[in-house]
Amino acid sequence: KRPRTSTGSVDEDSTSTTGSTRIRILCRVRPFLKHETTDDCITLEDRTVRIVNQRNPAEAFRYEFDACYDAQASQSDLFQRDVRPLVDNIFKGLDATMFCYGVTGAGKTHTVQGDAQNPGLIPRTVEYLFTNKRMRNKLKYSVAFTYFEIYKESVFDLLVPRDHHSSSGLPIREDAHHNIFIPNLTEQSIASYSEFQRAFQAACRNRSTASTKLNVASSRSHAVLTVQITWHDTVRNADLRGRVHLIDLAGSEDNRRTENGKDRMAESGAINKSLFVLGQVVEALNTGAQRIPYRDSKMTRILQQSLGGRSLGMMIVNVAPGQKFYLETYNTLNFATKSKTIVNNARVHAVAATPMEPQYGAVGLGKARRGSGA
Ligand code: ADP
Ligand code: MG
């Protein structure tokens, strides 16, 4: 078995031999936007992210990831280096799952969906499958996709207009083999990348209309896009399948702080719970725990077969630069990383001290430990 590459990408055969279920965790820092004050508080060095402790500027928190992407990193860099190797595994009949986690405004939708000028991971993945299809013409596979939203623990199909389904959403079922499925979810076959683009654009518009009708911003729902390839394996004489799930998670900000009202509370509760459960599932997989709490939220239940086992997973942690996001960045990093070190801040500079109440500090994936310094 060949070693992992320096960027930590999975090489061709590592999964088939090790069956590793570790979820790789990446961090991506977006650039400052035009109207933003460029008071940066994040330093990237290799695979580490460092933020100055606002309470004690002589100290900094250092977090280690499997890979980091700075503001200059392009959509293509991210896809080629870390996502394409994940997608390659579906040709072996495996599943791959990729999440974007972070607060609203941190760059999740940009990363997963992107726009016409900067297509994100979804269009790049599908385009790759079709480019690859030509290259791998020995393997004749068909491609289909589903796209749904999970809002307050209910599932809504984004491939049908909002008016066409019940307000309670689609049911989730379990078959005799404990496979979870959503019976009436639309599965759209696609024969080319351009066909996908048309269908996906319509679905994206549907996502925003659906959200408007629910009177909710799309940042409060999880959007799950699944691309599936199926083919007939002549050697094994069996029909095989590989899937990739690309997920734009609900914003991880704690809405309880800013918004009141019963609806918002229920909604925030559902978001916080599902993200908390996802964090626990990732941690359980990464520490090799016996019990993986898939059943504790709709999303992890639906993704159960594609997380763990012989599947590959990745979480991209999106953060926004600037002091304005300091607390959110701190919470996000604490939630997402396994290793946090407290180090001396070599370049001490004064920062306005603001009271901090970390909400996720105690429940994240990370465990703080004291380090010897930068
Ligand atoms: P989220 O989905 O996490 O709420 P968005 O993806 O909508 O965040 O990003 C917020 C804003 O930042 C958008 O205007 C988006 O175009 C921009 N943005 C995010 N990431 C990048 C990036 N890597 N490069 C350039 N612009 C970005
Ligand atoms: Mg978004």
Image (spheres, rainbow, N blue to C red):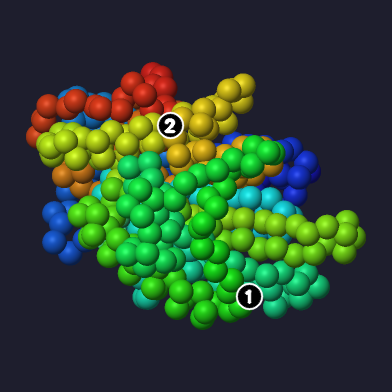
Residue drawn at (88%, 56%), measured in percent from left and top?
A: 236
Q: Secondary structure at mark 1?
A: helix
Q: Quadrant of ligand 2?
A: bottom left
Residue shown at the point (39%, 73%) measured from the top left: 202
Please tell me whether mark 2 or mark 1 is closer to you in this view: 2
Q: Quadrant of the N terminus?
A: top right
At label 1, the amino acid type is: Thr
Residue visible at 46% across and 74% down?
199
- In front here: 145 or 251? 145
Residue on which disc 1 sits: 131
Residue 268 % position (x, y): 25, 37
Q: Is residue 80 visible?
A: no
Amino acid at pointer 2? Val
Q: What's the distance in space between the residues labelled 2 and 1, CA to CA?
A: 36 Å
Quarter of the image with the C terminus in it: top left
Figure check: 122 above or below 303: below
> Residue 296: x percent and y percent?
46, 30
Estimate the x, y position of residue 79 in percent, counting from the top left. Answer: 51, 61
**Category of crowding for the residue at label 2, using alpha-carbon neighbours closer than 10 angstroms: few (below 14), some (14–19), many (at least 20):** many
Asked if 292 appears above or below 46 in the picture, the reply is above
Q: For residue 273, which quarter of the picture?
A: top left
Query: Which is nearer the N-term, disc 2 or disc 1?
Result: 1
- Left or right relative to 102: residue 33: left
Marking on residue 277: 2
**Callout 2: SS:** helix
Most extreme residue toward the right, as rendered?
235
Residue at the (42%, 27%) spot, across then down: 366
Instruction: Where is residue 34? Give x, y as percent.
Output: 17, 64
Query: Residue 347, located in which quarter of the rendered image?
Result: top left
